[in-house]
Image (cartoon, helix red, strand yellow):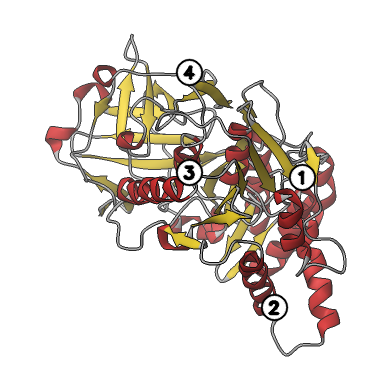
Amino acid sequence: MFMTSKSAIVAITLLGCLSVPSHASVDGIGWRSLDSAQIAPELVGVWQSEATGHLIAFTDTGYAVFHKVGELCLADTGQLPALQLFQVLPGQTRAELFFYDYRLHPDLLQNPLSVVRVDALPPHCMTADATAEHTLAETFDAVWKLFDRHYAFFEERTVDWSQARQVYQPRAEQAESADALFDILVEMLRPLNDGHVNLSWGERSFNAGRPRLRQQLTEAWRDADTELSEGAFVGQWSRQVRQSIGRVLDEGSHRIGADGAVEWGLINQRVGYLRVNRFARFDAHAPNRAAELETLRQTLVEASLDLSSAERLIVDVAHNGGGHDAAAMTVVEYFLDQPREVLIYAVPGTEARHVRLAPSGQGETRDITLLTSEVTASAAEAFVLMMRALPHVTHAGERTRGGISSLLPKPLPLGFQVTVSYQPVLDAEGRLFEGSGIPPEQTLILFPEGELFDGYAAGLEQLAQ
């Protein structure tokens, strides 16, 4: 496990500062303002991350973030969260920057930005507005180079990126509008089939994920001959399927907490059931993420009491499309039997981070069946990897989506923006499931052809038996 003592980490913001960064325009660049007393002298200067392409310039009163994309240097447009902490390593030439609240997991710093000191910013760094002078062909080149440099999973996604350039660059050079270029980029990115790859320009947006289940729902919508839009039909399907647990749970045992993120109950008086619908948004009135996680913890305590009589447990993330890993870890801690290494972050450009968690209470030793589907993605898949490290957990259901990596957002010329999957997330044994998804030990099809609305509840009943 990577652990850092509090004495080695320096907070550059006071408690609560920069939860929403303040911006001031200085020479056309968005600077994030800080009290000068909060900036340590050893941090003043320019730092660069080769792994992520970030450039961060510190003065004694604030800092500005830039992105190096090929030969371009573009000012950040708000993608990078507010900086919370840093540590300067011996020699004063390397540092690690932390962009989320250290208080959430004071002994777990899994995602630092590793940077080295450089002499100065490149002379050509510019704001996003200034990129209007670039051509469509130059924008295409920036997108290709960005993915070539930072996308981590071409092999897993079976995409020949060099061949993609040969196919699409001539078309980009002939494009007559940004709309046309957007369409070309969509064609180039679609084969990645990666739900963490996004492209946006103006009001247009594209996600490269193409889950099989979503295609089934599109076909079902067409066959239904309904007046509902496709999106409304899919939303109706999701609500009906989630509500179908009402016919499985014992009467009067169904409970909901954490703003609908967590549901639980009993099946046949002996099987405890807990479903986590998402790893985010646990309390609409919470002032910050730390308060939201506290709401989640209290909800889990309540659920644990209600399920204390159960002989075994079903933990269901079959409808969970993700959120943030800190929430996933918070839930895992409630099911641990003892302290265990559960996850590895293969952080680009720095040492891998081994995540070790401890039980939040006395420790859970009952048998647990973990239920997943193709909907299970992102932070929910990190949750699955962590839970599979527990010997009393059996993974059942369908293979997960296979989109576990962290996202790297980047601005581009002409107002284009993308997100790139750049960071491998491995299980405790060092195995990678990006692209392929995490296969269950016990296969149970929850959404079979022709039974998209009924298979889920039937699967739960089967598991309970």
What residue is shown with label 1? 399
- Coordinates of residue 368 in the picture (x, y in percent): 62, 38
Q: In the visual, does 213 lie left or right of 78?
A: right
Secondary structure of residue under mark 4: loop
Q: Is residue 174 visible?
A: no
Q: Earlier in the sequence, mark 2 or mark 4?
A: 4
Q: In the visual, does 235 lie left or right of 91?
A: right
Disc 3 versus disc 1: nearer the observer: 3
For the residues marked 3 and 4, what is the alpha-carbon distance in whole angstroms?
31 Å
Secondary structure of residue under mark 1: loop
Judge the density around disc 3: few (<14), some (14-19), many (≥20) Cα neighbours within 10 Å.
few
Judge the density around disc 2: few (<14), some (14-19), many (≥20) Cα neighbours within 10 Å.
some
For the residues marked 1 and 4, what is the alpha-carbon distance in whole angstroms?
28 Å
Quarter-wise, where is residue 392 in the image? Answer: top right
> Which one is nearer the viewer's eye here, 340 or 137?
340
What residue is shown with label 4? 1
Q: Earlier in the sequence, mark 3 or mark 2?
A: 2
Q: Is residue 214 visible?
A: yes
Quick check: marks 3 and 2 in contact, CB under 8 Å?
no
Q: In the visual, does 194 lie left or right of 132?
A: right
For the residues marked 3 and 1, what is the alpha-carbon distance in whole angstroms?
29 Å
Secondary structure of residue under mark 2: helix
Disc 3 versus disc 4: nearer the observer: 3
Q: Earlier in the sequence, mark 1 or mark 2?
A: 2
Number of the label disc, if any, that sits on residue 233: 2
- Coordinates of residue 31 in the picture (x, y in percent): 29, 47
